[in-house]
Each structure stands twice: as C-alpha cells, then as structure tokens.
Image (tube, rainbow, N blue to C red):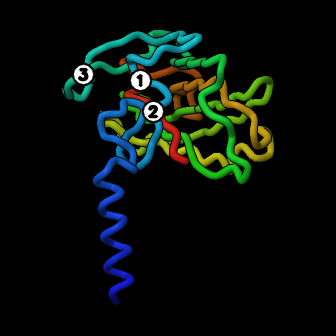
Amino acid sequence: MTDIRLTVAVVALLCSAGCGPKAQDPAREAGGLRLLVDHATTLSFRNHVRATPDPAGGPGTVLMSNSESRSEHQMVFQQKTGFFPVPQDHSGAVVARVFVRQERRVRVALVAGDRLKSYYLQVPEEGQWCDLVLPLTHVASKIPAGAKVDDITLWQLPAEDSREMKAGAEFYLQRLSFRP
C-alpha cells in the first residue's frame, strides 16, 4: 500500500513540475492532440480557404471554403516538411473539426508524396462543430509507415444521388489535429 501511495505522489510531483504537455503550448491541445492546421498556421500552401468569424457564434476565427462550384467545396493544406510521419503500426488518427450547412457528405484525403488515401464520411450534425476521426489504420494499404503526410485536402460533396450542391451549402474547418 505504501508503494502505491509513493508512486502516486511521485507522479503528481512530476506532473506539477511540468513533465506533461503545457496548456500554454499552442501546438498541443487537450487530450494529447497536436495541432496541424487552424486559421493562424503557417503552411507551405493553403488554397480554396479564407479566414472568417465562427459560424456557430463562438469567439475567434475559422477557415471557410471559398471554392464554390456546383459539385463540391474544397480546402487544400500542404506542408512541404510534412505534418507528421505515419507511425510504424499506423496507430493514431487525424481529427478534423468541421461545420457544414446543407450538405453533410465529406471526403478527406491524406497524401504522402505521391501516395493518397481518402476517407468518405457523413458529418453527424449540420449547423454545429463536429469532430471527424480519421484512423491511420485506414491508410495502411496505401501510405507506408514512416512516410510523411504532407497534404490534407477536404471536400464537401453533394448527396450521392445528386450532382450539384444544395443552395446555401457551406463548409468550415476549425482545426486539423493529430492524435498519436
């Protein structure tokens, strides 16, 4: 029993001394997530997006797709040095925090060099922020372990039975994060 209390005391002391991730570190979020992209991130390439106030009325700025076509809205984020290397066991996930209006169907592509793997998802709710979790086990057949993901592209798509987006369709991104 004494060993357990001593272990707990040492862990508490180490944590209070700053061994865990610091809250003020902008690259770290709650729950161990590492920020990849938000409105203020410096990237090698950012296309089809613009900064805008939060559509849910929250504080701060988010990104909105400004590539409006009849068939899709798109956001492209590239980092020449890579966002992160794919872990050896393809563990972890990319988490996209999105907000949509009118159309809930989304495609997200993770690209490493010339290797690409897409996820096709339905946003659970329209008109509120939702986290889309993209497990890296999904890319194992296309992107090898150790490869650096250097491009993350997101599309808002019309319903499968339609070729055109509904009027008023909007696509927002609060952040992309990596969860080891």
Dot 3: few (<14), some (14–19), or many (≥20) neighbours within 10 Å?
A: few
Provide residue 67's location: percent of width, then percent of height. Answer: 50, 10
Between the C-alphas of marks 1 and 3, the distance is 11 Å
Q: Is residue 160 left or right of residue 132?
A: right
Name the amino acid, label 1: Asp
Q: Is residue 156 left or right of residue 2?
A: right
Between the C-alphas of marks 3 and 2, the distance is 16 Å
Provide residue 68's location: percent of width, then percent of height. Answer: 48, 10
Asked if the residue at tag 2 contacts the one at tag 1, i.e. Cβ–Cβ closer than 8 Å, the answer is yes
Q: Nearer the viewer, residue 102 or 58?
A: 58
Q: Which residue is mark 1?
A: 38
Q: Which residue is mark 2?
A: 35
Q: Assign a secondary structure to mark 1.
A: loop
In this view, 1 is above or below 84: below
Name the amino acid, label 3: Gly
Q: Which mark is residue 119?
A: none
Foreground tag (3 vs 2) = 2
Name the amino acid, label 2: Leu
Dot 1: few (<14), some (14–19), or many (≥20) neighbours within 10 Å?
A: some
Q: Would you identify the image quadrant in which residue 27 lies?
A: top left
Q: Which residue is mark 3?
A: 60
Q: Nearer the viewer, residue 72 or 136?
A: 136
Q: Assign a secondary structure to mark 3.
A: loop
Residue visible at 42% across and 29% down? Answer: 175
Q: Assign a secondary structure to mark 2.
A: strand
User: Mark 2 or mark 3, which is nearer the start of the sequence?
Assistant: 2
Between the C-alphas of marks 1 and 2, the distance is 8 Å
